[in-house]
Image: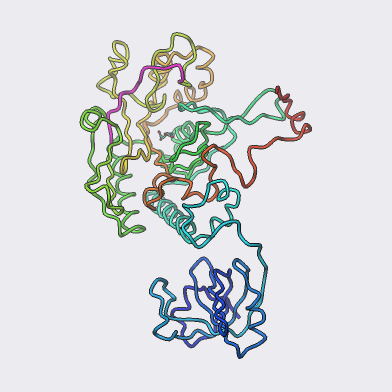
Amino acid sequence: MKRTKIIDTQDLVGKEVNLYGWINIRRDHGKLIFIDLRDRSGVVQAVFSPSDTELRETADKLRPEWVVRLKGKVKVRPEKMFNPEIPTGKVEIEPLELEVLNEAETPPFALDTDGYEIGEESRMTYRYLDLRRPRLLKNISKRHEMVLFMRNWLSGMEFWEIETPILTKSTPEGARDYVVPSRLYPSKFFALPQSPQQYKQLLMTAGVERYFQIARCFRDEDTRGDRQPEFTQLDLEMSFVTQEDILNLIEELFTSLVKNICPSKKITQSPWPRLSHREARKKYGTDKPDLRKNKKDSDELAFAWITDFPLFAKQTEDDFFHGSGSAKFAPSHHMFTAPHPDDIALLDSDPLKVRGLQYDFILNGYEVGGGSIRIHQPEIQEKIFNLIGFTKEQKKQFEHILTAFTYGAPPHGGIAPGIDRFVMILAGEPNIREIMAFPKTGDGRDLMMEAPSEVSPAQLKELHIKIVK
Ligand code: ASP
C-alpha cells in the first residue's frame, strides 16, 4: 500500500492510510496507549485500545524516535479531544498494522522544543537529530523555496546558472584565504574562492551576458553570529548595464520573492529608499541603518540601498591587500570596482575622495550584500592596482584578468546578496546557524564530523608537507 504523508490524514477521514515516521511521544494511559507519529509534514495521533492485544504489545515497547510503519483508519476524534494546535488535530488513527522499522537510543536532548535552550556543543555534535525539530526543518524548507524562486525568476530573465571552480587561485576580497596543497605540484597551493568574482567577470568577457550562481564562498575570518567560514551568495553579473539596471533587477526579484514565499511580511517602503554612503553615516551614524518603522514587528522588512561609497579607505596593517610598504589605499568593496566617471581625475589628485560605482543592499540593519559596476579597461585596472600599492609580482597574479580585458571586455557589473543572512532575517532567526543544515560552531569547527582534524603521515608525505609543532 502506498505511503500517505501525515499532513494529508486531515482530509482522509474514513480512509485507510499507510504512515511512515518517527515516534514523537508515547503516552500510556493505562487502558489506552497514545502515540504521536511524526514525519516531515506533520504529526498525527494514534490510539491503541486494549482489545487488540497483539498491536498493543508492540505499541507498549515503542519509545521516542523509533521508526515505524503504521497502517490504520483515519477517524474523527471525539470533539472534546480536538487539538487546535496542529492541522491534524481533528483526526486520529485507529491502528490496523504496526511495524517497527528501527529502534532508537534515547536522544541526548529534547526534540520537541524549539531547541534554543540547548547548548551549541550538543546541538552541533548531533546535528542530524537537532535538525529533526520542526522549527529547523521548516527553516530548511523555506530556504529551499527561496533559492528555488531565485533560480526560476532569474532563469525567466534569461540568466544562466553557471558553476565556477572551488579549487582556484585566491580572489583577494579583504579576507584570508583557505588554501589546499597540491599533490601533483609540490609546494603549490590552490585557494578556495572568497567569491567567484574574477570568474564571473571573465564569463562576461566570454560573452555570457547574464550569469548567476548559488555560490559557496570561503573566508578564513573569525566567526560571528551572522558570519561563517563558508557561506552562500546569490552571485550574479550582467553585461551592458548601468548601476540603475542592477538595483532595479534586484529590487524586483526580492520584492516578488517576499510576495510569493513570505506573503505575511510587509515591506516598509517601495521603491526601496536609496541613501548615499555619506547621507547614511551623517543621519544614522552607520552604513547599514535599520529603517523599520516598528522594530518590534517581526513581519516588517525595511529594504534599502546604500550608494556612492568611497572607492578607497585608508589601508591598515590588517588589510590583506597590502603588499609593498608604499601601499596607502584599500578598496572599500574590492579592487575590480569602477570609479565614478565624474571622479576619474581625482584618482591622481585625491584618491580618498573618489566615489565608487558601488552599492550595498541592506535589510533591517544588516548588510545583505554588495556589488558594483566593474572596471573593464585594463589601464584603469592597472591604475587601481598601483594605488593599492601592488608590486610587479602582485600585479602578475592578476595578469589573466588584465589580459582578458585587452580582448574586448564588455562593460559589466553585478552584485552578490548573501543567502544565509537573507533567510535568517526572513525566518526571524537570531543567527545564520539556524538556517544552515550543517553550520560550523561559533568557534569555527564541525563537531559532528570532528573537523578540522589531523591527516595521516602518509597523506602529509604525498602533499610534501611537514608539520612544525
Ligand atoms: N564578490 C562580491 C562580494 O562577495 C560581490 C560583487 O561585487 O558582486 O562581496
Query: Looking at the rendering, in which quadrant would you find the C terminus?
Result: top right
Give the magenta part as a residue range.
306-318
Percent coordinates x, y for residue 352 in the rendering? 31, 17
In the picture provided, is 219 more to the left or to the right than 430?
right
Taking depth in this image into account, of 83 and 367 the one nearest to the observer is 83
Taking depth in this image into account, of 149 and 431 the one nearest to the observer is 431
Query: Furthest-front residue in view?
Result: 30
Percent coordinates x, y for residue 108 in the rendering? 60, 56
> Is residue 56 depicted above or below 455 in this figure?
below
Percent coordinates x, y for residue 282 in the rendering? 21, 28
The part of the image, by quadrant, that contains residue 79 is bottom left
> Is residue 360 depicted above or below 326 in this figure?
below
What is the magenta segment's predominant secondary structure?
Answer: loop
Say which residue appears at 48% left-offset and 78% top-offset: 9
Quadrant location, ligand no. 1 = top left
Say which residue appears at 48% left-offset and 61% top-offset: 134
Q: Would residue 457 be counted in the magenta stretch?
A: no
Q: What colouring style does the render use?
A: rainbow
Taking depth in this image into account, of 301 and 100 the one nearest to the observer is 100
Percent coordinates x, y for residue 388 in the rendering? 42, 16
Say which residue appears at 35% left-offset and 32% top-offset: 372
The part of the image, by quadrant, that contains residue 81 is bottom left
> Is residue 178 depicted above or below 146 in this figure?
above
Query: Furthest-right residue in view?
Result: 458
Say which residue appears at 55% left-offset and 70% top-offset: 25
> Is residue 327 depicted above or below 247 in this figure?
above
In the picture provided, is 307 more to the left or to the right than 328?
left
Q: Would residue 313 be counted in the magenta stretch?
A: yes
